[in-house]
Each structure stands twice: as C-alpha cells, then as structure tokens.
Amino acid sequence: MSLELLIIPVVTILGMMGGQGMLGKTPRRYGVPMASLLVAIKKKKYKSLFFVIWMVLLSMGYGIDSKLAKVFKKDWIVRIAYGLLLSVPLIALGSWYGIVALPLAFSIRAGGFKIWKYDWLWEDFIRYLTLGVLVWLIVR
C-alpha cells in the first residue's frame, strides 16, 4: 500500500475523532490539514500549502452557533456553504471534484452508534472519507 493511499483512512479517522475525547476538535481542525500537507510535501507538491487554509475553515464549524449559521439561517444552506468553502483549497490545487462532493457530503444527516464511550457517526464517516479521497486524488 502506498503512503498516499494511507491519507484516506488517516483523514477519515482524524475527522471523526474531532469533538470526542480529551483532545477536543484538535484532530479535525489541525490533524486533517497537517496530515494532508505532510503527504503532499513528501510528494513535492508544494502548492499544497493551500491545505493550511483548512485549519481556519475546519475551526469555523457549521453548527447552530457558527458564523455561517448567523449568515445563512437554514441548516441545509449552512452545510452546503461549508462544503463549498472546504473545496476552495482543492480548487486552488486544480481539483474541482470537491465543489460537488463536499457540499453533498456535508449535507448528509445520518445516525450512528456508540463504541465504548465514543460515537461512530455515519455522517462524519462520509464527510471525512470524502475529504480523504479528495486529498488522495491530489497527492497520488
């Protein structure tokens, strides 16, 4: 298995870990962009510094108290706008897939279940799996 392919489960796991446990949202806010950046730089794709933008965007959030919620009011519009914002670094790197995939992934509302004290949320799995695949498409 190539190093680049490992970015998919790494981004998925870091994204799902965000908000759970003592690390708070740090794995999502900083782990996802840093893991993406490290793999991209290893492949000598220095334009991938655009992944640093995700630190700001993933810190914004899209919940009821977010800035986006105050602007757009309706949850489904907030989620589409958030997905579009996350696609900006991907567009800057030449991949337009995110402009469709991320708004769709962030629009999904699904349940989940508990694994010990942690939540497995299908919507988080889909969102961050999608993000991981999009990163992989750039760094492969």
Image: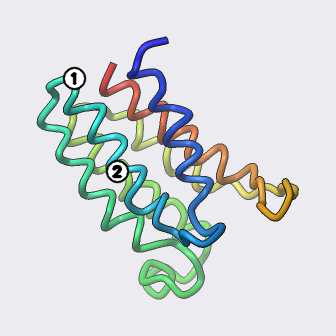
- Residue 52 lies, in percent from the top left, at 24, 54
Which residue is depicted at the point 49% across and 47% down?
A: 102
Q: Is residue 96 left or right of residue 23?
A: left
What kind of element bears circle 2? helix
- Residue 12 lies, in percent from the top left, at 57, 42
Instruction: Residue under label 1, please give it.
Output: 43
Which image quarter holds the C terminus?
A: top left
- Residue 31 lies, in percent from the top left, at 41, 53
Instruction: Residue under label 2, please give it.
Output: 33
Instruction: Evaluate if marks 2 and 1 touch, with contact meaning CB atoms under 8 Å apart.
Output: no
Mark positioned earlier in the residue sequence (2 or 1): 2
Q: Using the image as rendered, state which of residue 103 and residue 5 is in the foreground.
A: 5
Q: Is residue 129 left or right of residue 88?
A: right
Mark 2 is surrounded, within 10 Å at the Cα level, by few (under 14), some (14 to 19) or many (20 or more) other residues, namely many
Q: Which mark is residue 102?
A: none
Residue extending farthest front: 22
Q: For the residues marked 2 and 1, what is the alpha-carbon distance in whole angstroms?
A: 15 Å
Give amino acid for label 1: Lys
